[in-house]
Amino acid sequence: MKQFAFVQKKSLTNLYGSFLHKYRKYDDVMGMIKVIALASFLVICWFSYLIFINKASTRGYFLRQENQKLSAISFQFEILKTKMLDYKQQNRDTIHGSTFKNDVINVNTEVVRIPDKIELGFVR
């Protein structure tokens, strides 16, 4: 037994049209979701760049500046150390190269023993 079902042409076109409309509407929504996801990904990448890479390069910049200041200070310290060594050398040369005669005085020492239990006091 065969059955035949007849569907009107108009309702079939309406069904197909509504399907196309839903698909197009869904396609627009999916396109918007894709654009929003891409934009949010780019914003997240930009913020991570600002937080990590830019902060690190800024810290590196300030570290380089402080290292340059430190090397300038150490250079000035080396100049000062060299001047101090020159002054010490001049002092040594003045002491050893003087025309005065250095007399050495010999002092004979005497060992004096003090008794243990003597009370010291004034004598009248």
Image (spheres, rainbow, N blue to C red):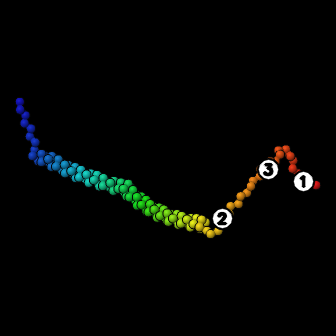
Residue at the (80%, 48%) spot, across then down: 113
Residue at the (50%, 65%) spot, across then down: 79
* Location of residue 5 with respect to 22 vertically, above or below: above
Tell me the residue that label 1 is attached to.
122
For numbered disc 1, what is the local secondary structure? loop
For numbered disc 2, what is the local secondary structure? loop
Q: Is residue 25 left or right of residue 69?
A: left
Tell me the residue that label 2 is attached to.
102
Residue 112 percent location from the top left of the image: 79, 50
Q: Marks 2 and 3, how far apart in space?
A: 31 Å
Give neighbour class at mark 3: few <14, some 14-19, many 20+ (Cα, 10 Å): few
Of the numbered discs 2 and 3, the one sitting upstream in the chain is: 2
**Disc 2 marks which amino acid?**
Asn
**Disc 1 marks which amino acid?**
Phe
Q: Is residue 41 left or right of residue 7?
A: right
Quarter of the image where one finds residue 51: bottom left
Looking at this view, is 113 or 82 the one in front?
113
Residue 35: in sight, yes or no? yes
* Quadrant that contains the N terminus: top left
* Location of residue 45 with respect to 2 vertically, above or below: below
Residue 84: in sight, yes or no? no
The count of marks equals 3
